[in-house]
Image (cartoon, rainbow, N blue to C red):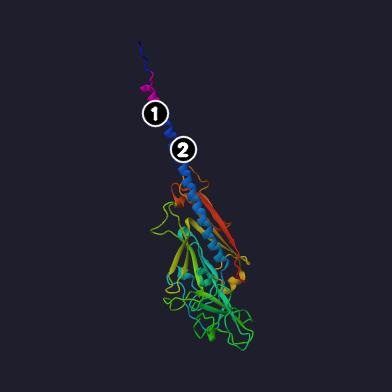
Amino acid sequence: MIKYNKQHGFSLIELLIVMGLLAIVAIMTMDAFTVVLKQSSQTMKTVTTEIDQTIGLDILRSDIEQAGFGLPWTFKNSITYAEAALSPESTYNDSPSNAPRAILSGNNVGYNNSDYLVIKSTLVAGSDTANKWTYISKDTSATPTPKSWTSNNLNTNDKVIVIKPLYDATGSNELVMNSGTFYTTYSSSSFASAFSPATQGQRFIIYGVSAADTSLANLRMPFNRADYYIRRPSTGMPSDCAPNTGILYKATVNHGDGALTEMPILDCVADMQVVFRLNTDSNDITALTAAQIRGQVKEVRVYILFHEGSMDRSYTHGASTVTVGEFSLGSTFNLATTIGANWNRYRWRAITLAVKPKNIL
């Protein structure tokens, strides 16, 4: 009897064909995955830039809006104070005895001929103490005591300044002083009498400047100060940033030694230009006094050129020149010349902040 073998298999040729097809599918899938991964990475870096941009520029906008907050216009007595200790930031000092200017800038003095912006107010320190204020009034024969709020009160021994608000031509936002001392420490129960109103109906404003700190013997200045500028650090520059770009910093002047404490605001910045809108035909505030700045500056416009994400060889940027500013104000930035090769593989953005300071009258 003939027996039939019912077991069947694949020939070598069939197996080779199937393996070849699987290899092709795997390669195609890998290429597609690589593209998706690259696009996902680029999108993530762009989103991260947008988040940093939102946070950083909100800080800048807020500081400009509050320029001049808590600043004295005049001094009760002769005063000697200090600001930034080193150059170039010392260029923008009003110390040792001039009334502080709320906002000022240096034109084309920074990285890539960018501008340098300085803002003075009690708020720009960004600390908990600097965001607090209260008042002290002489309403009865009792000893004047500061107003206490439901929350967010100043703490005992916080370093504060006291301002006598506008009452007449000789007392316009005058800094209350005890001889040559321009600040005091806060107490809700026994506030220094030399900094308290003595006349019935008077009210003084108390502004927080710096927290109680045993390491800080004295206030350096009767306000806080923040400088904005672009700098490319020798170490720590993000690797995704294009060549010849820097970091936009906010730097606060330390009361202890006059040095700057930097906080990065935005990465991969090529240029920043500052334009002032005045109620005169000029846009230059360099020679203006503190009083003239208060009377003439109506709007501050900050123009910033930076790129989002990292270099993308599948992307091609358009024109090689970008206007950072408006009309004849600002600069014309040449990406090809300054950034160099592959300048057009970055997603460049030029944004404008138009801000009206609330405390410049």
Q: Is residue 140 visible?
A: yes
The kind of secondary structure element at disc 1 is helix
The residue pinned by badge 1 equals 19
Left or right: residue 169 versus residue 127 is right
**Crowding at mark 2 (Cα within 10 Å: few <14, some 14-19, many 20+):** few
Q: Judging from the image, what secondary structure is the residue with disc 2 in?
A: helix
Residue 261 horizontal/vertical position (percent): 44, 67
The residue singled out by tag 2 in the image is 32
Instruction: Please tell me whether residue 72 is drawn above or below residue 48 in the rendered image.
Output: below
Q: How far apart are the alpha carbons under marks 2 and 1?
A: 20 Å
Residue 14 percent coordinates (x, y): 39, 23
Question: What residue sits 53% from the left and 63% below the top?
Answer: 59
Q: Amino acid at mark 2?
A: Ala
**Residue lying furthest bottom in this view?**
141
Q: Nearer the viewer, residue 114 or 300?
A: 300
Mark 2 or 1, nearer chain start: 1
Q: Position of residue 25 (x, y in %)?
A: 44, 32
Q: Is residue 181 magenta?
A: no
Task: Please say whether residue 121 is visible from this viewpoint.
Answer: no
Q: Position of residue 320 (x, y in %)?
A: 50, 48
Of residues 198 and 104, the one drawn nearer to the viewer in this rendering: 198
Name the quarter where the C terminus is drawn: bottom right
Q: Nearer the viewer, mark 2 or mark 1?
A: 1
> What's the magenta region?
6-21
